[in-house]
């Protein structure tokens, strides 16, 4: 039996701002943006984004709907790096992200495992942009 993680939910404050960040800032593609008409939940949508052409998991952007969910926006990793965006063009992606205004928490550095820099997404979750040494 084959299994894979199809999506990972990421809490956001606003769908459209998050879509712009992920598609323009990180270069992801919008896979789906479907309105979900549910009583008592106006404006709820099913929004999935993923790196362009990448097989595997997507992010399900979920607008926080309760006080508890709103409090968790940007804290899904508990202050640690939460997600790892692997690339085969570290410097190209880094420059595009800089031009968009992505907040980097440090300067890029070379480690034994590859080239890496920590950045924050639109909500404040910490990510690694990472080019593994084997891909260099």
Image (tube, rainbow, N blue to C red):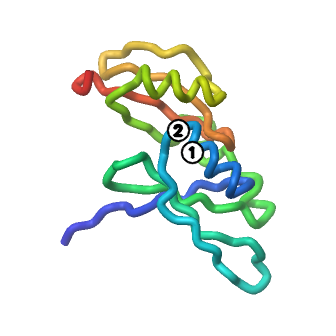
When asked about the image quadrant of residue 4, the answer is bottom left
Secondary structure category for the residue under label 1: helix
Residue displayed at 61% across by 39% down: 121
Name the mark on residue 22: 1
Is 47 above or below relative to 34? above
Residue displayed at 56% across by 29% down: 97
Residue displayed at 45% across by 51% down: 50
When asked about the image quadrant of residue 105, the answer is top right
How many marks are shown on the rendered structure? 2
Q: On the rendered structure, is 80 left or right of 29?
A: right
| C-beta proximity under 8 Å, tags 1 and 2 | yes
The N terminus - image quarter: bottom left
Q: On the rendered structure, is 1 left or right of 15?
A: left
Secondary structure category for the residue under label 2: loop
Name the mark on residue 4: none
Residue identified by numbered label 2: 26
């Amino acid at each position: 039996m084959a299994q894979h993680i199809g999506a990972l939910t990421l809490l956001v404050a606003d769908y459209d701002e998050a879509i712009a960040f992920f598609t323009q800032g990180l270069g992801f593609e919008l896979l789906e943006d479907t309105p979900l008409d549910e009583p008592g939940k106006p404006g709820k949508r099913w929004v999935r984004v993923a790196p362009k052409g990448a097989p595997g998991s997507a992010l399900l952007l979920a607008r926080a709907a309760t006080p508890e969910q709103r409090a968790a926006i940007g804290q899904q990793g508990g202050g640690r790096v939460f997600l790892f965006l692997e690339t085969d063009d570290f410097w190209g992606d880094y420059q595009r992200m800089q031009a968009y205004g992505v907040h980097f928490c440090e300067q890029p550095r070379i480690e034994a495992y590859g080239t890496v820099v920590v950045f924050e997404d639109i909500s404040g979750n910490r990510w690694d942009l990472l080019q593994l040494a084997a891909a260099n």
